[in-house]
Image (spheres, grey):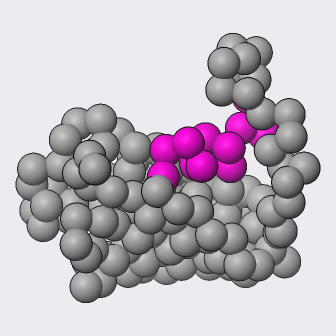
Amino acid sequence: MTIFEKEIPSSFDAVQFTVDEIDVVLGEIIPAIPTHIFFKIDFILRELLNNAVEHGNHFQVDKRVHCRIDYSDHQLTLQVSDEGEGFSVTDDTLSTYDTDDTDILLRDRNRGYPLLLEMAKTVVVIGSKVLVTIDLIER
């Protein structure tokens, strides 16, 4: 079941407003989300939307970012797409990522995709669309 769907302009302000809006919707529809899972959802949403704004649409406010959230069987599926050229994920994307290396974890750039893989159940990239599945209960 789709619980949220919206197109936003390519700005960080629009991302902030949208994530706040989604937080309210989630609280109304699924009120018992554990705090640590809610943190994951919030982090992943911000990462996906900010990347679409910055890397996909290059802050061009006339270009839109589409966000859709589906809820089914104690899982959320987040779908974010932009009007950019898209990207592909290869094994090289993860070759230098080590979750025990604090220098990598604390750097400002190039840590989003590996962190998504750590936090989500699944991450699928198809061109300029990213689909992320998050379990709402520990299994």
Write down the quadrant of residue 72 in the picture: bottom left
Specify the segment rendered in magenta.
107-120
40 relative position to 8: left or right = left
Residue 25: x percent and y percent? 20, 64
Where residue 9 sits: x, y (%)?
58, 71
Residue at 27% in and 74% down:
71
> Depth check: 29 or 37 in front?
37
User: Residue 113 colored magenta?
Assistant: yes
Q: How many marks can you see?
A: 0
* Residue 100 in sight here: yes
User: Is residue 106 among what the camera can see?
Assistant: no
Q: Reply above or below: 70 against 58.
A: below
Q: Residue at x 71, y 38 (%)?
A: 111
Quarter in which the N terminus is drawn: bottom left
Residue 67 to residue 105: above or below: below
Relative side of 128 to 91, left or right: left
Horizontal placement of 138 versus 18: left or right?
A: left
Compare residues 17 and 36 and report the one nearer the observer: 36
Horizontally, residue 117 falls left or right of residue 70, namely: right
